[in-house]
């Protein structure tokens, strides 16, 4: 699927998305709007809508009018990290899905859409140009929020429909599958275990889970089982063992402690962490910033506070950690860290069974 600007030369517009710059539209000095049209295989325009594209350089332009079109190439393979886009309303996303049901996710990714990419959303939403232009109307932000929910639901449905083959087999089998993957350019799906206390971190966990789903990977954690049930520990162990990466989120609570056995007195979260270390899992740790206030409902005893501080010291030993202040910032940090970790240390992963 080609994505081109209307001034692109030598394009017959068959099976093509065409962006026409709306020079007449001005958002407080920012000109970012495009009319988007889809031409089918016969070269007929079957739908049109509008979107806005932003580039970081716009906020540093010396002129009074900041025009994005001068920064945009005639044909778009993939917008780089300086760019983002957003539909002017929810109808934009609905039309994309209606007319291009098998490709609309890829198109949104190529355009660095703020509904599709939660990491981009956390980064770009504070930029002056994004506030003044892309988010000028409530309709645009509401459309983005609804589209993000739709995309999450679609990805969940996709995961349910797709059958994956675990690559956690003997070395000879792994090498055969790796050869097949490398030659077919197949993307692995990774399982990421999310560990944290629960009642105080419901929203942060949800944000992180959603972010991982938007990355098209599998988040797993205590939502699948009751960590406080001793009989569930074998399941938790197996889930950590089969996970490719371990994400630890620490808030202001130490959490529920184990009452019996050799682990009595430590929290279930710490027990999960120790097991992930034992299994040599790549651990990505995120600790709440010291300046974030503790809600009254979640204030623990002095003894538990001391245990929490010791736990933090243990986590920070021999590894880098990141400090987070709010759920959106946390989700963005997790996405960035996972991307980097997947590049540096690819896990075993999962792949469709028909490859």
Image (cartoon, rainbow, N blue to C red):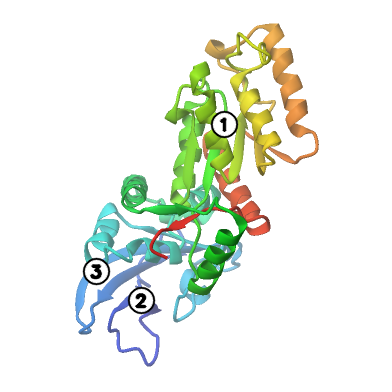
Residue 299 visible here: yes
Q: Quadrant of the N terminus?
A: bottom left
- Residue 321 drawn at (x, y percent): 71, 38
Q: Quadrant of the C terminus?
A: bottom left
- Residue 78 drawn at (x, y percent): 48, 70
Disc nearest the viewer among 2 and 3: 2
**Occupied quadrant, residue 332:** top right
For disc 1, the marked residue is: 237
Q: CA distance from mark 2 to mark 1?
A: 44 Å
Asked whether disc 2 touches disc 1, contact meaning CB atoms under 8 Å apart, the reply is no
Residue that sits furthest to the right in the current view: 318
Disc nearest the viewer among 2 and 1: 1
Q: Nearer the viewer, residue 161 or 309?
A: 161
- Which residue corresponds to the image point at 52% horizontal and 39% vertical from the top-left? 328
For disc 2, the marked residue is: 1
Q: Earlier in the sequence, mark 2 or mark 1?
A: 2
Q: Is residue 212 above or below residue 75?
A: above
Q: Is residue 103 above or below residue 211?
A: below
Q: CA distance from mark 3 to mark 1?
A: 51 Å
Q: Nearer the viewer, residue 30 or 199?
A: 199
For disc 3, the marked residue is: 48
Question: Left or right: where does residue 262 sit relative to residue 268?
Answer: right
- Residue 191 drawn at (x, y percent): 51, 45
**Occupied quadrant, residue 39:** bottom left
Q: Mark 1: which secondary structure?
A: helix
Question: Left or right: where does residue 194 sit relative to residue 337?
Answer: left
Q: Is residue 275 above or below residue 161?
A: above
**Number of numbered discs on residues:** 3
Q: CA distance from mark 2 to mark 3?
A: 16 Å
């Amino acid at each position: 699927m080609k994505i081109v600007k209307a001034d692109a030369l030598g394009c017959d517009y068959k099976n093509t998305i065409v962006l026409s710059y709306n020079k007449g539209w001005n958002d407080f000095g920012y000109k970012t709007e495009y009319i988007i049209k889809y031409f089918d295989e016969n070269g007929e325009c079957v739908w049109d809508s509008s979107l806005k594209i932003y580039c970081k350089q716009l906020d540093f332009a010396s002129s009074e009018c900041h025009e994005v079109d001068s920064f945009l190439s005639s044909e778009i393979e993939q917008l780089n990290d300086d760019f983002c886009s957003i539909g002017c309303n929810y109808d934009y996303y609905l039309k994309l899905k209606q007319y291009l049901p098998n490709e609309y996710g890829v198109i949104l990714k190529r355009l660095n859409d703020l509904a599709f990419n939660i990491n981009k959303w956390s980064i770009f939403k504070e930029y002056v140009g994004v506030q003044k232009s892309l988010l000028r109307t409530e309709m645009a932000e509401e459309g983005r929020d609804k589209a993000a929910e739709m995309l999450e639901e679609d990805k969940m449905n996709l995961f349910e429909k797709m059958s994956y083959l675990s690559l956690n087999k003997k070395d000879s089998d792994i090498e055969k599958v790796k050869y097949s993957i490398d030659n077919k350019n197949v993307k692995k799906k990774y399982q990421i275990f999310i560990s944290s206390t629960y009642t105080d971190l419901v929203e942060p966990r949800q944000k992180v889970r959603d972010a991982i789903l938007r990355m098209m990977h599998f988040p797993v954690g205590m939502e699948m089982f009751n960590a406080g049930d001793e009989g569930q520990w074998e399941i938790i162990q197996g889930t950590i063992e089969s996970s490719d990466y371990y994400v630890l989120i620490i808030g202001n609570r130490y959490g529920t402690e184990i009452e019996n056995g050799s682990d009595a007195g430590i929290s279930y979260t710490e027990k999960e962490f120790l097991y992930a270390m034992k299994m040599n899992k790549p651990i990505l740790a995120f600790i709440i910033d010291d300046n974030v206030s503790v809600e009254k409902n979640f204030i623990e005893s002095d003894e538990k506070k001391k245990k929490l501080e010791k736990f933090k010291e243990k986590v920070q030993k021999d590894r880098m950690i990141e400090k987070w202040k709010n759920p959106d910032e946390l989700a963005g940090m997790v996405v960035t860290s996972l991307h980097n970790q997947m590049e540096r240390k690819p896990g075993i992963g999962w792949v469709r069974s028909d490859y």
